[in-house]
Amino acid sequence: MFMSLPVPAPAALSLSQQLTRRIVDELASTSWMSFARYMELALYAPALGYYSAGATKLGASGDFITAPEISPLFGRSLAQQIAQVLRITAGDVLETGAGTGRLACDVLTELIRLNCAPSHYYILEVSADLRQRQQQLLLKELPDWVDKVVWLDALPAVFTGCIIGNEVLDAMPVHLITRTEHGLNERGVIWDNQQFAWQDKPLTTGALFDAATALDLPADYLTEINLSAAGFITSLAQCLQHGAVVMVDYGFGEREYYHPQRNQGTLMCHYRQHAHTDPFYLPGLQDITAHVDFTAVGVAGIDAGLQLAGYTSQAQYLINCGITDLLALTSADDVAAYVPQVAAVQKLISPAEMGELFKVMAWTRGIDAPLMGFVQGDQTRRL
């Protein structure tokens, strides 16, 4: 398989080798690490992890393309929802994991057009490299608004307004769980014969055991459990005083996520627009992701005191937020402008593309009005 993947440049390969040594050094003292820890290091180790080093990650020249990179109409549609929340709360916007900054630019541009711009647009970004890219893009496209964009190193103690995140939860470290005829195991990572390898060990106690036991998995089953995602939603709930949290990501409800036929899990790696399943390939140079269990994160928000405002497909959500109306603002007679926009919108809403696999979930605190993104086609029953 790897023979067909692009060969990394020498400098990139050197970074991957340094990260490998960093992980091996930790394994020297522990001999075994959870996959969640391995994934955390592979993605976020300072200066070496995938999201911490300087390689291009998003867009056509990167490893994958996100919705904001496909069309500005994604961000402009999301801005309609944000505007509804801001009009109710008179609050600000907080974006978690802002990627290239493309979504922030598009959301702010539309909020300005709607005369609903916030006093501040906060960005919580753990990657120094991505933070720099975001600053450069915003300075280029919205120079008059740069002073109102504030980068955060941690969640604020209190927040009022709208919190958003696009493809944030799928990049959080996951634990790998296997069930055999002898019981539950956690699948971890060892260093063997000069390479990373898998090793299972019995799982008998703790929060991970409790979560896995509650799923009642069948035998001969491998899957992921994302404790970090549920914890993150809990943290967002704790800081939100008045407003909404809106998360966009790919995934399923629990019944579909842990279906007996999905017995190899959802773990996936992305390298130069190629998808494969080996997380040990070139650590630090590829993205590692898993689908989101929306039932688990939905319950986390409710348990933390938020009201579940809705859950639906990305297609239905964008349609509810008026993406077709925004598309109509470009005249069909202007073929050069209109046709590419139509093609991009099709990628966002087509069931064969992103429309059905990607979902949107939202929670609110202190908002009684229904959120516009869920007025039709709510799928909460599927959780």
Image: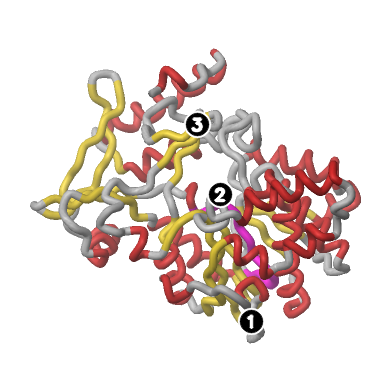
State the separation of the CA atoms marked 2 and 1: 28 Å
Q: Which residues, given as a range, are shown in magenta?
A: 158-169
Q: Amino acid at mark 3?
A: His
- Across and down, in percent, residue 243 comes to 65, 75
Query: Which mark is drawn over residue 274?
Result: 3
User: Where is mark 1, residue-wise?
Assistant: 370
Q: Amino acid at mark 2?
A: Glu
Q: Residue at x 34, y 32 (%)?
A: 26
Give the answer, above or below, for where 284 lies relative to 9: below
Element carrying mark 2: loop
User: Where is mark 2, residue-wise?
Assistant: 353
For label 3, count other residues whose C-alpha is less than 10 Å away and answer few (under 14), some (14-19) or many (20+): few
Q: Earlier in the sequence, mark 3 or mark 1?
A: 3
Q: Earlier in the sequence, mark 2 or mark 1?
A: 2
Q: Nearer the viewer, residue 167 or 5?
A: 5
State the separation of the CA atoms marked 3 and 2: 16 Å
Element carrying mark 1: loop
Q: Farthest residue toward the left?
A: 182
For label 2, count other residues whose C-alpha is less than 10 Å away and answer few (under 14), some (14-19) or many (20+): few
Give the answer, above or below, for where 226 lies relative to 8: below
Q: Nearer the viewer, residue 120 or 273?
A: 273
Q: Earlier in the sequence, mark 3 or mark 2?
A: 3
Q: Residue at x 45, y 44 (%)?
A: 289
- Across and down, in percent, residue 356 comes to 52, 58
